[in-house]
Image (cartoon, rainbow, N blue to C red):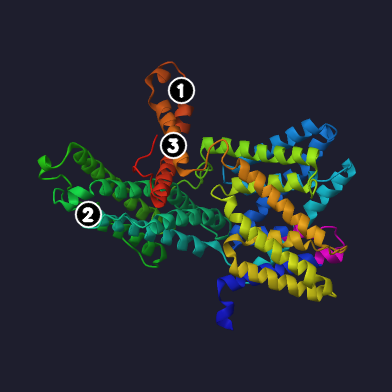
Amino acid sequence: MLLFLKNPRIQDGIRTALAVVVTYGIALWMGWEEPIWGAYAVAVVSLPTIGLTVNKELERLAGTVIGVSVPLILAGLFFQERLLFSLTTAGFLGVCAWQMSFRRHGYAWYVAGMVSLVILAGQEVTSEDLFLRSVTRAYETGLGVIVYSLTALFVWPVRSGAALEKAAGQYFDTLGDLIKNATRFTGASQDAPGTEQIDGLFSAKNSLGKMLPAAQTDARLSEASKGGWSFLFVSLNRQISLAMRVTDLLGRLSSAFREGRAPECDAVVNALGDRFSRLAEALTSKSGFAAPAPLSFNLVPEGQQQLTEAELRDFTALSAVFVQLDEQCRAMFSVVATIKGQSELRFSGDLPEHLEADLPFERRGHIIQVVLAFLTAFWLWVYINPPGGPSFPEMAGIFALILVLNPGLNLLRLIIPVCVVVLGAGLIYLLIMPSLTGFAELGTLLFITTFLVTVYMQAAKGMVLCALFSVLNISNDQIYSFEVVAISALVIVMSLAVNITFQDFPYPRQKEKRLQRCLIEYLRKAGQILDPFKKSQGFTSSRDIQNCLRELPRIELRLAQFTHDLKADALPKNGKLRL
């Protein structure tokens, strides 16, 4: 039994289920109209560590304040003019989508857009109704946030420091394995490194990015450690790009290795991989460690006449990449020494907000998709009045914002899971809930369903729990009707259909097209830096150049990621991209 309770998933499930039951109990006891909003708050802020939870709670509260304020302003100015009202609401959603694209505080803007949509949804509402609805959303959300905060503090509290070190160790281990695995190209095998390793590398990087702000909140890091962690995270993009460059160059030189026309470089590749793997051990080591000396190697081919001109260029580039990777590795040893308090070096403690932002063309695409999805659903409601009424544009706008928050999400793959969740919740709603006689039984049902979803659907528990609570729609004035469940399911399907229609507009999501757009963006930024005419005429300021230099590493990493995605899915039949 004790081993069962030590499982982190079990602990998370108990914490979340307990917070949901307490939130519903307080809201129903107080006679609040829609306790579902407190449950929504618990579902989305219930995260593995205290730091992650606190950060998300603060963002949700900030987004709620914005989301309840904007509808009052828009309704006061344009409520009687449907055209202006729809355009201004769509414009606000576009602003939310733009801000969400910068990722650092994207969730706050997602909540702002979602809350504003829910408040504005309603037929023949007055300004008093809007004000009461805004206040209700605010204090119900606050209840869910407070209840889960207390639960996280007293029921198996988990701080983010250990999770941060674990994420960094996983990243360095995966990076070292990826580099060592590139030696496949130098032998008889022509297989590329497994896609699982590269996917794992990006996944570890994303985990590290989420844990760093959380650890800065709850792990009591010193200023030196904060600076070291920030510098480490800033360096990740460059390291991943260099590692993928190694695999690319070794792949292009594979024929030269197999035919014996190229010098042996396995020892260099394995040494670099081992050095990055040692970084993972250094992070968890309680004793001191020494940074390695610069790597010594010579990749100048002896029989240069046996190599083509292109192969000689690749060997020169490979040697330069090895030097840069070695410099990065030794710099990381210094950073880890600072993090562990074993060095006097100091790094800037600021985490750049632009680091994880989407690219400019992606931000423009997000705005267009959100605005078109909302306006289409809004005017379909006005002129056709489908089942669900104003819930249709509300749900369509929320799904559009979810796509911005999760740009890799494929809505077509969500249809079946969403339908299964709605069907299961509908069966509970129609067959089980009418027979419940008190909150003890209802609370037990909520605890069991929330616990099972949290344990077995960890990756998507927030979305699944919100769908579950939406269909159950628990309140003091509970009514049970098949029509309610059918309309809820139909609204969800119609909203998905609208967003699927605009998901590839104006920039298609096909990986070849995304790679083309990314390459165009890269060349445009590089051109702004290198164009001598623009510099001489003053068209390119030093600030523009700094912005371009800041954008280029992110575009370079995105290019590497898109290229990897294409290789994983197989190239076109002729093996070339038509750029």
Q: Position of residue 266 (x, y in %)?
A: 22, 56
Q: Image quarter for residue 499?
A: top right
Mark 3 in CB contact with mark 1 (< 8 angstroms)? no
Q: Quick one: SS at disc 2?
A: helix
Q: Quick one: SS at disc 1?
A: loop
The label number, if any, that marks residue 186 in the structure image: 2
Q: Residue drawn 67% across and 40% down?
A: 373
Viewport quadrant of the N terminus: bottom right
Q: Which residues are magenta?
A: 26-39
The answer to whether residue 421 is left or right of residue 172 is: right
Q: Residue drawn 50% across and 63% down?
A: 163
Above or below, 414 relative to 152: above
The Cα–Cα distance between marks 1 and 2, rounded to whole angstroms, is 45 Å
Q: Position of residue 138 (x, y in %)?
A: 78, 52
Extreme residue toward the front, this view: 573
Q: Nearer the viewer, residue 27 or 427?
A: 427
First-in-chain label (3 vs 1): 3
Q: Image quarter for residue 501?
A: top right
The label number, if any, that marks residue 516 in the structure image: 3
First-in-chain label (2 vs 3): 2
Residue type pointed to by label 2: Thr
The answer to whether residue 337 is left or right of residue 186 is: right
Residue type pointed to by label 3: Gln
Q: Is 33 inside the magenta-drawn segment?
A: yes
For mark 2, does the 10 Å Cα neighbourhood hold few (<14), some (14 to 19), or many (20 or more) residues? many
The Cα–Cα distance between marks 2 and 3, rounded to whole angstroms, is 30 Å
The label number, if any, that marks residue 540 in the structure image: 1
Q: Nearer the viewer, residue 333 or 503?
A: 503
Residue type pointed to by label 1: Thr
Q: Quick one: SS at disc 3?
A: helix
Above or below, 529 relative to 333: above
The Cα–Cα distance between marks 3 and 1, rounded to whole angstroms, is 25 Å
